[in-house]
Image: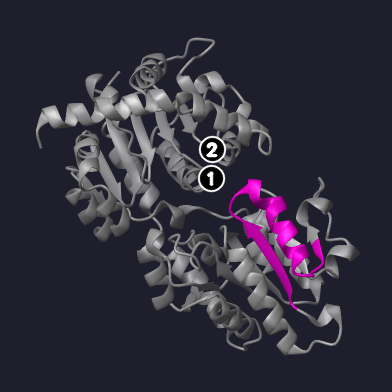
Amino acid sequence: MSGTLSTVARALYSLALWLMTPAYLLRLWWRGRAEPLYRHAMGERLARYPSAASPGSIWVHAVSLGETLAASALIDALRLQRPGMRLLLTHSTATGFAAGAKLLQPGDLQTWLPFDAPRSAARFLDHFQPAVGVLMETEIWPNLLHAASARQLPMVLANARLSDKSLRKSRGLMKALLTPAVRGLNAVLAQTETDAQRLREAGAREVQVCGNLKFDITPSAALLAQGATWRAAMHRSVLLAAVTREGEEAMLLSAWKTQIAALACKLPQDRPLLLIVPRHPQRFDEVAALVAAHGLRLVRRSAWMTSPPTPPSADALSADVWLGDTMGEMPLYYALADAALLGGSFAPLGGQNLIEAAACGCPVVMGPHTFNFAQAAQLSEAAGAAIRVADMDAGVRAALALMQSAQRAETVQRALTFASAHRGAAERMAHEITRLIKPA
């Protein structure tokens, strides 16, 4: 590919970003109405910092919550392999930033990744001067990678994945922009061989298959125990709709009402409980209103969230639907549930992470759309830890049948075995990252 074409493509991209900057900042301020963290340190979005930073940290960029959870396993492995390391942790979303704050140790830093404009990328790297940069999963930023290459900063794409859909999008005009960026990566640590092949086709050079970091995440023992305690006291079965996306809740509620009516439960406490956990916090109120519009009585998890934890209220125990409107409690929800519907897989959105459900011993029913986690979905189904269905109606039907099945305990054990069988990616990736760090 001609260097001139690539230079022109990056110049046009940079111009578009410069023109969009006011709208970008306004959007962050607008989102801050529901999630105030978006308004925190907005100058950092343009790489404006109030004080100096010490060079030499290991920089990990985890854009949002899912990437941050995966990064937690990698960060633990990096600390084991390089005791005393200093971490620079960056994010783009409020949920990622909040989760990342829990991973920090004394001497670590956390900040927003700036907008991918040339000057912002340059200021960011000159300010922090990391020893190595690690981008999680799919984060390819042309100007940031160009600035890193100019400074001879080693850059790694860790837990890397690329769907066939994304590969097709990277062709044509986008190829001139993205291919040089991908080629600028010193190492690409792919989840699967299929991901590795696609990344090579996209222009990556140093590609290795290391596995999926999400298998190395250990669910919180305290949250698992809390969920198990609630489950023992519920006297009702629970279906979890895990990490749902826009459009899925309406399909779910329609199917749920139809199939619960078919069960002909005489008393409210005889009916299964539906627990919905939306993917995005800004949609909590929207989903609550949707449940009310379907004539179902809702209680929000936040209504009895206390420290130390307290059990569900009597009002919650008799509700039709719970809304999981809290962050960081997915292990609790999985431990409480008899089965889970996988969010993002019933609309053409690629699915969410089903590995966490398996690690918590929760059987999964997934829809037809799992291209974001294709191999994990296939392995889970082959291991008997998950069931695939054609649509939401079939999903609710299959989940209710599984919840009442005598074989559910066997499915739980298969899920736990599946989750533990694929660990080790964090150690492999940490080794590849640390070997790129130049001696001080």
Q: Quadrant of the N terminus?
A: top left
Q: Nearer the viewer, residue 151 or 285?
A: 285
Which residue reaches farthest left? 2
Q: Which residue is mark 2?
A: 93
The single residue placed furthest to the top in the displayed view is 51
Question: Which residues are the magenta region?
Answer: 272-298
Compared to 297, does 150 lie above or below?
A: above
Discs 1, 2 touching: Cβ within 8 Å: yes
- The answer to if 297 sits in the magenta stretch is yes
Find residue 65 and name its label. Answer: 1
Of mark 1 and mark 2, the one earlier in the sequence is: 1
Residue 188 falls left or right of residue 408: left
Quadrant of residue 144 within the rendered picture: top left
Indicate the position of residue 146 as horizontal and vertical percent values.
26, 26
User: Residue 60 at what x, y percent from top left?
Assistant: 42, 34
Q: Nearer the viewer, mark 1 or mark 2?
A: 2
Residue lying at 65% horizontally and 50% vertically, measured from the top left: 283
Judge left or right: residue 304 versus residue 22.
right
Q: Is residue 252 above or below residue 63?
A: below
- Residue ID at (56%, 22%): 42
Q: Amino acid at mark 2?
A: Thr
Residue type at the position of mark 1:
Leu
Q: Residue at x 62, y 89 (%)?
A: 406
Label 2 residue SS: loop
Element under label 1?
helix
Percent coordinates x, y for residue 414 in the rendering: 49, 76
> Viewer-proximal residue, 384 or 177?
177
> Disc 1 versus disc 2: distance between alpha carbons?
8 Å
